[in-house]
Image (tube, rainbow, N blue to C red):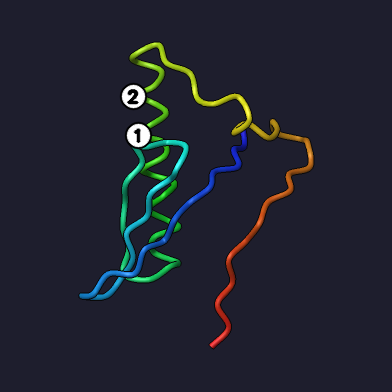
């Protein structure tokens, strides 16, 4: 399954980014760079999915955007030095 997940990357004074999601308040991670933070989001979201499944909760229905074999459209953040 693929998900479209809105994320907020908040720069930290000591460097790096804290990442949260306005639709999944349990999601919280960080990274030394945007790229690191994006990688960490995958692990954090997997943990949130497990918590939701274990507690019988469901994600907001509009987060699921497709299954394997279907085209997926998503926004991507790209940094150009």
For disc 2, the marked residue is: 51
> Contact (CB < 8 A) between labels 2 and 1?
yes
61 over 2 or under it: above or below: above
Callout 1: SS: helix
Q: Residue at x 60, y 42 (%)?
A: 4
- Mark 1 crowdedness (10 Å alpha carbons): few <14, some 14-19, many ≥20: some
Residue 78: x %, y % from top left:
59, 72
- The percent position of residue 55, horizontal first and vertical second, equals 34, 14
Residue 40 coordinates in the image, percent (x, y): 37, 53
Q: Residue furthest top?
A: 56
Q: Residues within 10 Å of mark 2 (few under 14, many from 20)?
A: few
Name the side, left or right, on which 65 lies relative to 55. right
Of 76 and 12, nearer the camera is 12
Give the residue at x 53% y 47%. Answer: 6
Which numbered tag is attached to residue 47?
A: 1
Q: List the single residue furthest toward the front.
A: 22
- When the figure is inspected, residue 26 is found, relative to residue 17, above or below; the finding is above
């Amino acid at each position: 399954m693929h998900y479209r997940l809105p994320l907020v990357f908040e720069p930290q004074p000591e460097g790096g980014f804290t990442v949260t999601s306005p639709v999944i308040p349990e999601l919280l991670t960080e990274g030394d760079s945007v790229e690191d933070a994006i990688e960490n989001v995958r692990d954090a979201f997997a943990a949130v999915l497990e918590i939701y499944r274990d507690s019988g909760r469901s994600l907001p229905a509009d987060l699921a955007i497709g299954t394997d074999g279907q085209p997926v459209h998503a926004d991507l953040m790209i940094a150009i030095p």
